Amino acid sequence: MKSQKQQNKNLFASKVGAILAAAGSAVGLGNVWRFPTETGENGGAAFILIYVLFMLLLATPIMVTEFVIGRHGQSSVGESFVKMSGGNKAWRWMGLLPVVSGILVLSYYAVIAGWTMHYTSEALMNHFYGKTAADYSAEFEAFSSDPVRPVIWTAVIILLTGGVVALGVQKGIERGAKVMMPLLFLFIIILVGCSLSLPDASKGLTFLFRPDFSKVTSSVVLSAMGQAFFSLSVGIGCLCTYACYFQKNVDLMHDGMKVAVIDTSVALLSGLIIFPAVYSIPGLQPDAGPSLVFVTLPNVFQQVFSDSPVIAYSMSLVFYLLLVMAALTSSISMLEMSSVYFSTKFKIPRVVSTFAVSIVCVVLGSFCSLSFGDWKDVTFFGMGFFDLFDFIVAKLLMPIGGFIMCVFVGWIVDKEVLKNEMTNGGAIKSPLYVVYRFIIRYFAPLCIFLIFANELGWFKWLM
């Protein structure tokens, strides 16, 4: 048996640390990159309103469901399912979900995170100065398809992540979140201030905050629903794993709402950075997609601040530092999911399990990186390694995992056990409990099914 002191070392030391760690798991490149891309492609403000609605009604309740399972079990995800089911060992197989998801997600996510580190180094050395739009496009194409440099950066981001995870819950994950999350918000505020000072910033603000509901279609609604679902990274066990380290006095609903607010705030503030900047140069479009980050924005910073090289340099550097912080806060939770499973199951030190999983992710991450260059013709079902891993996680594991969690807590777990977790044994009131239970029993499973069907293209096939 572990002593009380040893058990406490495996829990977050404070509520603030727990919230920041969970928020760090949710906040990632998807907030700074995918959200503006989705917003640009789906009409701006109307998409955002629908997205916020689904964050409240769908994503947050599912996140709280992960919190409930993890905090109740305070063990690996599979064991937490077993404990919450009343000892049914058949649920132990759910422990494989975060293992597979964590390894696959980190493997391809680290490729993009590695790109952000490379661009941070480029910004630091002022390599963006004096280049044309064509230069940025050509250099990004050359770098992303290079067989060596992206692989090195992928390994660097994974090993940095492994270093934090190996230090443990309090000294590694919690301390890292307390440093990186405030830095992330500091960088965002600086960039928002600079972006809003641009001459045509008002056009970007109009795009973001003046809804045009004539552009709302069923596709836009489903895209907003999917973005809300994936923004919080629910369904694959990240937040369930972190909730294993929550203390028993954490208000799961209240603190879950805080995490959702932080996550949504980062996404909206990222829009305030990107769209005023994009509208500052005639001819650029808000729906430019992923190239916004690595091609369009370096061009924007250099052109808009052509008379102030110092500001252009600072904007570029701070922006890519922001991306690195966002990438690291999420990659830590991805690695933690898998490493804690092996550490618990095989009773090996955390450092050993973290190192072993990191090496596997470096190898698979190298495959994903090479799929943009030398291995682009190596495909499975028409997809390279990067697209294949993304498909498996985003379109299969996340919605299936989220659906199972909702059905498990909503229909299988004893309602008194659920209510006890939501009220901390009756110590706190949970006025939204009835609404929450209705959502996870009925509304959330239906929405997840619609997301799943949309992502797999079933609606297009039916039409």
Image (cartoon, helix red, strand yellow):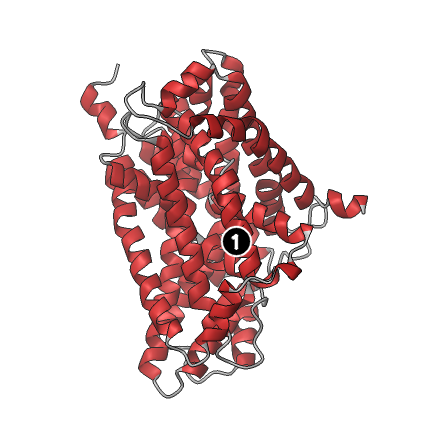
Q: Quadrant of residue 324?
A: bottom left
Residue furthest bottom as drawn: 307
**In the rendered image, the vertical position of residue 364 relative to residue 408, given as above or below:** below
Whole-percent x and y of residue 397? 58, 36
Q: Looking at the image, can residue 89 be seen?
A: yes
Q: Looking at the image, can residue 363 be seen?
A: no
Q: Quadrant of the N terminus?
A: top left
Residue furthest left as drawn: 5
Q: Is residue 56 rendered to the left or right of residue 249?
A: right
Q: Secondary structure at mark 1?
A: helix
Whole-percent x and y of residue 295? 52, 71
- Of 187 and 130, nearer the camera is 187
Q: Is residue 444 rendered to the left or right of residue 429?
A: right
Q: Residue at 49% across / 59% down in the picture?
A: 33
Whole-percent x and y of residue 130? 44, 85
Q: Report which residue position mark 1 lands on.
A: 49
Q: Residue at 53% across / 60% down in the picture?
A: 45
Q: Residue at 37% across / 88% down in the picture?
A: 307
Amino acid under label 1? Answer: Leu
Other residues around mark 1 within 10 Å, as few (<14) / some (14–19) / many (≥20): some
Q: Is residue 160 rendered to the left or right of residue 365?
A: left
